[in-house]
Amino acid sequence: MKFAPDGRTYATVGADRTLRLFSVKGARQITQRNVGAVPLSVAYSPDGKMIAAGCQDGRPRIYRNNGS
C-alpha cells in the first residue's frame, strides 16, 4: 500500500494481479486495474500523476493516475 503525495488516495496491489486505487476519505474504491502479472510493489510519482507497479515478471507497469 502506498499513499499519494497529496494524501487523498492510496494504491494497493494484490496476488490477484490487480492494482486498486482508493479514496482515503471513506476508504471507497475508485478504480481497479488488471496489471497482467503479480505485482509486488506500488509507487506514486512525486507529483502523483503516475502510478507504477513492480511485477513478479520483472517488468514495471506504469499508469496515469486519473482516478478512473
Image: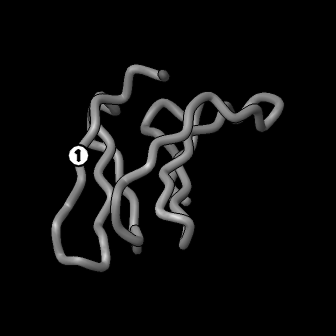
Residue 4 higher or lower than 36, as above or below? above
Report how many numbered discs are placed on residues in the image.
Answer: 1
State left or right for residue 22 relative to residue 4: right
- Identity of the amino acid at label 1? Ile
Residue 51 picture quarter:
top left
Q: Residue furthest left?
A: 59
Residue under the image location 35 percent in, 67 percent down? 37
**x then y, percent, for residue 6:** 48, 30
Residue 42 higher or lower than 19, as above or below? below
**x then y, percent, for residue 8:** 59, 29
Of residue 40 and residue 8, the one placed in the foreground of this image is 40
Q: Residue furthest right?
A: 26
Residue under the image location 55 percent in, 60 percent down? 1
Residue 18 higher or lower than 57, as above or below? above
Residue 45 picture quarter:
top left
Residue under the image location 43 percent in, 38 percent down? 5
Residue 19 higher or lower than 1, as above or below? above
State left or right for residue 12 relative to residue 57: right
Residue under the image location 33 percent in, 58 percent down? 53
Identify the image's colour scheme: rainbow, by chain, secondary structure or one colour: one colour
**x then y, percent, for residue 39:** 40, 68
**x then y, percent, for residue 44:** 34, 46
State left or right for residue 28 relative to residue 50: right
Of residue 17 and residue 23, the one placed in the foreground of this image is 17
- Callout 1 secondary element: strand
Q: Residue furthest front?
A: 36
- Density class for disc 1 (Cα within 10 Å; few <14, some 14-19, many ≥20) is some
Of residue 3 and residue 22, the one placed in the foreground of this image is 22
**Residue matched to label 1:** 62
